Amino acid sequence: MKNKNVVVVGAAKSGVAAAKLLLKKGARVTLVDEKSRTQLSAALKGLPRAVRVQANRSKFYSDSVDLIVVSPGVPWDHPDLVKAREKGVPVWPELELGWRFAGPRKTVAVTGTNGKTTTTALIGHVLRKAGRPTVVGGNIGTPLSALVDKIRPSTNLVLEVSSYQLEGQVTFHPNVGVFLNLTPDHLKRHGTMAGYARAKSRLFARMEKKDTAVLNGNDAWCRRIAGKVRARKIFFPNPVDRRLAKSIRLLGEHNLENAMAASAACRALGIKSSAIRAGLASFKGVPHRIEFVRALNGVKYFNDSKATNVDSTSVALKSFSGPLILILGGEHKGSSYRPLVPLIKGRVKLILTIGEAAPIIAKDLRGAAPLRSCGTLARAVKTARALAGRGDGVLLSPACASFDQFKNFEQRGEEFARRVKALK
C-alpha cells in the first residue's frame, strides 16, 4: 500500500477504520462522503488533517487512483465503481481490505438474513469460555480493518458478514462458514431474491473440502446454495446440536436455531461438547434483540430495535404469547407487512406506528389490531405507558430500517431504552 493513491468511499465506521489502516500502511488516502470535514469532525477523530476529505460521492474515480475501498452502504453498481473496474482498478469492500492484513487465521464467518449478530456473538462467547483467544467483529460492530492490530497467529476470528460486504470480496476465505437463512431483505440493493442469494453465497466462494459449511437444512435457499458448496457440510437442525442447544436460556425458537448453528460451528473448530454446553448456558444475549429493558407497574418493556425487516419482527412476535403493544415503523425497505397479520391476531392488542413507513404499515395491517399513528418513538413510548395494563408487554420491533429518524438501529434502541427507563 505504500505511496498508493487509495479512495475510501463512505466515512462511517468501516470507512474510517479502512482509512486508518491504509494510513498505517503508507497509503495516500482520500475519504469520500456526502458530508464535509466539518460535519464529519466526530467521525474523523484520530485521522490526520493530511487526509483529503471530498464531500461528494457522485464522482471520485480518476486515472491516478490505485485502489478504491467501499463501505457497505455504497451501491456496488455506482457508476464510478463500474468505471474503475472496467479500467482494471481494484474495488474492494472494507472486509476485503481487512482480510488482506488480518487473514489467514482460524476464521468463522456468519451470514444470513436474521440471527447473524446473536449467532456471531454466541460463537465468540463459547470459544472464549473454552479458553480460545478470540476476536469478534465485522458487521457486528467493529470493522475487520480496526481489528488487525489485535489479531495474533493463535487468534480465532469470528465475523458477522453482510451481503453488502460479501458481494465484492476477492480473497476472503473463512475456515467455517455459517449460513443461517435467507428471507426477503435488501431487495432495493440486490434487485431479486436470486441476486440477494448470489451475494450471500459468496461466503463460500473460496472455501475448500478441508473447510466446513454450516447450513440451515430447513431453509429452501440454504439447501439450494448447498449444492454448489465445495466444503464439508453440516446441516442444522441435527440430533447432536439440537441436544446441545437446549442449554440456551434466550427466548424463542429462533434462538434455538441460532444455538444449533453456533454449536455446529464450534464443533467444527474442535470444541468439546461439555464446553459448548457451558458456553450456551452462560450466554445472556445481545443488545437490541428482544432485550428486556424494565418492568413498570406489571408491564414489561422489550427492545428489539435490531428487527429491521418483517421476518425478524415475525421471529420476535413468535417469542411472545401476548398481550402486546407493538411499536412498528421507520424507513420502509420495500417488503409487505402483510405476513405479520396472523402473528398479530391474538397476540397484539394495539399497534403504534412511527416513521415514514407508518401509512404503508397502516394499510397492510388494516384490521389485524387497533392501530395508532404516533410519528415519533418518544410519542409511542408515552402512548404505550398510558394504555398498557398489568400483564401486558410493550415491544419495539420495528420491521423497518432506522435511517429516517436515527443514525442506526442501535441509536433507536438506546433512545427507546432511555425513554422507558425514565417512565414513572
Image (cartoon, rainbow, N blue to C red):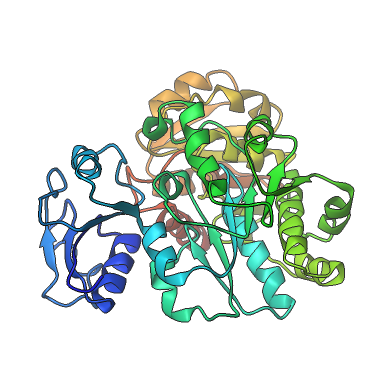
Q: Residue at x 53, y 44 (%)?
A: 307
Q: Quadrant of residue 414?
A: bottom left
Q: Residue at x 36, y 50 (%)?
A: 72
User: Residue 311, can we see it?
Assistant: yes
Q: Is residue 408 above or below residue 421?
A: above
Q: Is residue 330 or residue 393 the one in the foreground?
A: 330
Q: Residue at x 69, y 33 (%)?
A: 223
User: Residue 424, can we see it?
Assistant: no
Horizontal and vertical percent position of residue 324: 64, 40
Q: Is residue 401 above or below residue 347?
A: below
Numbered label tally: 0
Q: Is residue 27 or residue 264 the one in the foreground?
A: 27
Horizontal and vertical percent position of residue 398: 50, 41
Horizontal and vertical percent position of residue 150: 47, 80
Quarter placement of the N terminus:
bottom left
Q: Is residue 185 above or below residue 112?
A: above
Horizontal and vertical percent position of residue 4: 19, 67
